Amino acid sequence: MAAVTVKDVAERAGVSIKTVSNVVRGAPKVSEATRTRVMEAVRELGYRPNASARRLRTGRSGLIGLAVPDLATPYFAELAHHVRTEAAALGFTVLIEETLGDATEELRLATGVGASLLDGVILSPLHVSLHELAPVANEFPLVLLGERSYERDQVVADHVLIDNVAAAREATAHLAGLGRSRIAAVGVDRQGSATSRQRLEGFQQALHDAGLTFDPRLAPPVKEFGRRDGLLATRALLSLPADQQPDAVFCFSDMLASGAQRALYEADMSIPEHVAVASIDGSEEALYSTPSLTSVVPDKAAVASLAVKCLATRIRAETPPPFEVHMAPHWLEVRESTDGVRRPLSP
């Protein structure tokens, strides 16, 4: 039996071959009625796109990879959604991988799990070094997400990030501006990740600006940026003598803040009356927590758009441009956990 072709699907659905191609690759500019009709024809005929033929015709598969540390983290789950949307608009399909922060796995996935399949990779590395990634980026389209500290002449790949120092500084300054004087930092990473270092730097800058002294006892170390880590770190803070306990907590992620809020609830500490809580991530979880969480919101849609467009340029350009660092915007959303003003959620 002859293989079903895209022409067969187009004839069955009563549309053009280009429309079938747009539907199959997930392009957004197709009406829902047309998309449904095409997909019904695809199922009825048993059509399967021929990736090998596309590869031979264009030299590309149309597949890109997104490798993140933890898909259970709301930030990365939301980011993956935005990357998929941006990629579909440019004609790419996204394969999503989870590295769990393992340096070996990060380096393996940075190469596209064998560049014969993927056209390029967007990677959010935690522990693989820039030195190890440099030769990969010179040979294979690669875009990095997240924090790294280096000078512009040391850029080894296109890199999309937010200004973590500024973000942490703004959140901490907000707490200090409320008159809080014993502000704790939850998120000092024992492994010394760049994200943790930069957010701690911004925290300390804001304390200095407010005339406050950094107290190491108010910066308990954590293993990860998870809810359990936030719970345990905040319990440690609440075990301090009463006059040394914090009246505000700045958490380095929304998940840490979720754990911190639970610890405060267990201790019958009212938020924000006894302890104000602020964070970074701007996840949907922050909006629906009780009380709703004041959080710095990275523009995840902008991060995804910058990353996908950079990668598409690297994939399609005959002579790729020099590597660049791209800064995405962020802003502070003040909510109930710091100002105590109840706000009904918009439907």
Image (spheres, rainbow, N blue to C red):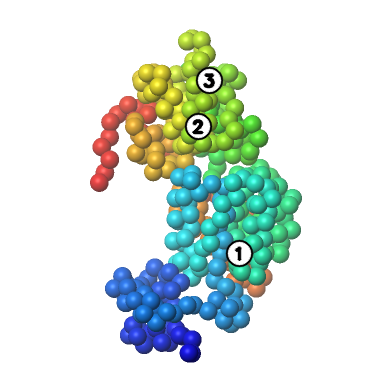
Q: Where in the figure is residue 344, as x and y percent of width and height?
A: 25, 37
Give the side of residue 153 with respect to residue 291, left or right: right
Q: Amino acid at mark 1?
A: Gly
Q: In this orientation, which residue lies closer to the viewer: 222 or 41?
A: 41
* Pointer 1 or 3: first along the chain: 1
Residue 155 visible: no
**Mark 1 and mark 3: Cα distance apart in space:** 44 Å
Q: Earlier in the sequence, mark 2 or mark 3?
A: 2
Residue 317 can be seen, yes or no? yes
> Pointer 3: what residue?
236
- Pick whichever of labels 1 and 2 is earlier in the sequence: 1
Q: Is residue 324 above or below residue 228?
A: below
Mark 1, secondary structure of its residue: strand
Q: Residue furthest bottom?
A: 2
Q: Against 258, is 60 above or below? A: below
Residue 233: % across, % down: 53, 25
Residue 115 at what x, y percent from top left? Answer: 66, 67
Front residue of 199/220: it is 220
Pointer 1 and pointer 3: residues touching (CB < 8 Å)? no
Q: Report how many numbered discs are placed on residues in the image.
A: 3
As shown in the figure, which amino acid type bears the numbered disc 3?
A: Ala
Mark 2 vs mark 3, foreground winner is: 2
Whether label 1 touches label 2, CB < 8 Å = no
Q: Residue furthest front?
A: 1
The image quadrant that residue 113 belongs to is bottom right
| Residue drawn at 63 percent across, 38 percent down | 193
As drawn, the label of residue 228 is 2
- Residue 336: x and y in percent read 34, 30
Question: Which quarter of the picture shows residue 175?
Answer: top left
What numbered label is drawn on residue 120?
1
Query: The residue under label 2 is which amino acid type?
Result: Arg
35 lies above or below 251: below
